Amino acid sequence: MPIATPEIYAEMLDRAKAGGFAYPAINVTSSQTLNAALRGFAEAESDGIVQISTGGAEFLSGTTVKDMVAGATALAEYARVVAANYPVTVALHTDHCPKDKLDGYMRPLIDVSLERVSKGLDPLFQSHMWDGSAVPLDENLEIARELLEKCARARIVMEMEIGVVGGEEDGVVGEMNEKLYTTVGDALDTAEAVGLGERGRYLLAATFGNVHGVYKPGHVKLRPSVLKDIQDAVGAKYGKEKPFDLVFHGGSGSALEEIHEAISYGVVKMNVDTDTQYAFTRPIADHMFRNYDGVLKVDGDVGNKKAYDPRSYGKASETGMAARVVEACESLKSAGTKRSA
C-alpha cells in the first residue's frame, strides 16, 4: 500500500479515536530503522506513523552535510518506495520543531508540500509538529495560527504542544516543574486561538507529567486525568465530546494502565523513540561481544568478513526493533486494526 493520502490519514485518526486505540509514532533516523518500523507495523497488522526529528533529519542528510530538509525529503521519498511492499498504511510526520528551527525545517517542508499540492500531488509529509513549548503561550498560539493556515492549504495536519515535556530530546531540555501539566486555561486559550478543526486539522500534545527519555519506575509522575479535565472543559464550552485529538509524548517506562487511561481520553498518537533505539542497538552489542574476534582484526589476524559485514548485525537490529514496534502496537491497542485494502 502507498503512504497515506490526506483523506486516509484523517480516516486513520478518526478511526483510532472512535475505536479506543492509538497509533505508535516511531522515530527513525535511517533506512534501516524505517524498515524496522514498517516490518513491525506489518507483523502487528497495524497501520502507523513514522516520524523524523530535526536531529534525525540532519543525521540522515550526512553527518558533514547537516541539511535537515534534505534528510527529511530523502526519508520521505525512500519511504514512498519501500512502504509500498508492506500490507499496512503509514503516515509520515516530522517531530518536534522548536522556534529557532522553523525556518530551516518545518516551513520549507510545508513549502515543498504546497508546491506538490499545486501540481495535484499529495503533500510530502502528512503532518508536521510545531513545538512552541519553550515560548510563552500567547506567542506559541500566534505562531500556531500562522502555521496551521499554511498547513491547511498544503493538506497537512499540524501537531502542536502546550505545556512542557521534561527530559531531553535532540538537545532540547524540558525542566521538571509544574509546566509539565497543561492547564484547562491553556486548553481553552488554544481552542479560541486555532479553533477545533474548522481552520485546519491539528493534533494537540497536552502534557500531563510527560518526560522524554527513560527512567526507573516512580521517577515520572503522570496524571492522565489532566487530559480528561481539558477535554471536558473545552467540550462543555463548544458542545463537542473529546474535542481534541491528543498526542502522548515522553511515554517510555509508563505503566500500561496509564497508557490505556490516556487513550480513553482521546489520545490517538503516542511517540516511541527511546525504547526502539535500545531495541535496535541491543542486538548489535550482542553481535559485537559474541564475535569480537571476527569484527576486529585481533593480533594482526584477518577477522571474519561475514561477522563485520553490516548486513549481519543489521538484520538482527531490524528484527529487534520490529519486535518492539509490535509490542507498542499491542500496548496501544492498534494491533490487528489495519485498514482493509
Image: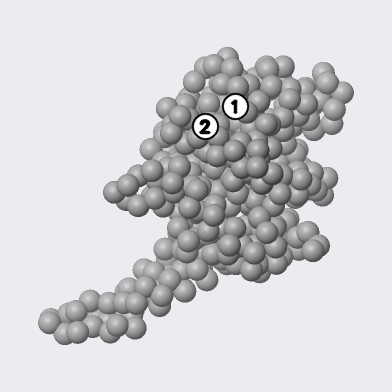
Numbered marks: total: 2
Q: Which residue is denoted by mark 2 in the rendering?
A: 107
What is the image's colouring? one colour
Quarter-of-image position of residue 231: top right
Q: Is residue 283 left or right of residue 190?
A: left
Helix, strand or loop at disc 2? helix
Residue found farthest to the right: 239
The span from disc 2 to disc 1 (Cα, nearest Å) is 8 Å
Answer above or below: position of 3 versus 105.
below
Q: Where's the C terminus, which quadrant?
A: bottom right
Q: Which residue is denoted by mark 1 in the rendering?
A: 147
Residue type, mark 1 in image:
Leu
Q: Residue at x 40, y 77 (%)?
A: 312
Graded by Cα atoms within 10 Å as few (under 14), some (14 to 19) or many (20 or more), the crowding at tag 2 reads: some
Residue found farthest to the front: 119
Helix, strand or loop at disc 1? helix
The answer to whether residue 216 shows anywhere in this view is: no
Quarter-of-image position of residue 154: top right
Quarter-of-image position of residue 322: bottom right
Q: Nearer the viewer, residue 22 or 1?
A: 1
The x, y position of residue 236, in whole percent, is 84, 22
The answer to whether residue 329 shows anywhere in this view is: yes
Q: Residue at x 61, y 42 (%)?
A: 116
Graded by Cα atoms within 10 Å as few (under 14), some (14 to 19) or many (20 or more), the crowding at tag 1 reads: many
The x, y position of residue 112, in whole percent, is 55, 39
The x, y position of residue 332, in whole percent, is 69, 53
Answer above or below: position of 41 versus 139.
below
Residue type, mark 2 in image:
Arg
Marks 2/1 in contact by CB < 8 Å: the verdict is: yes
Q: Is residue 173 left or right of residue 76?
A: left
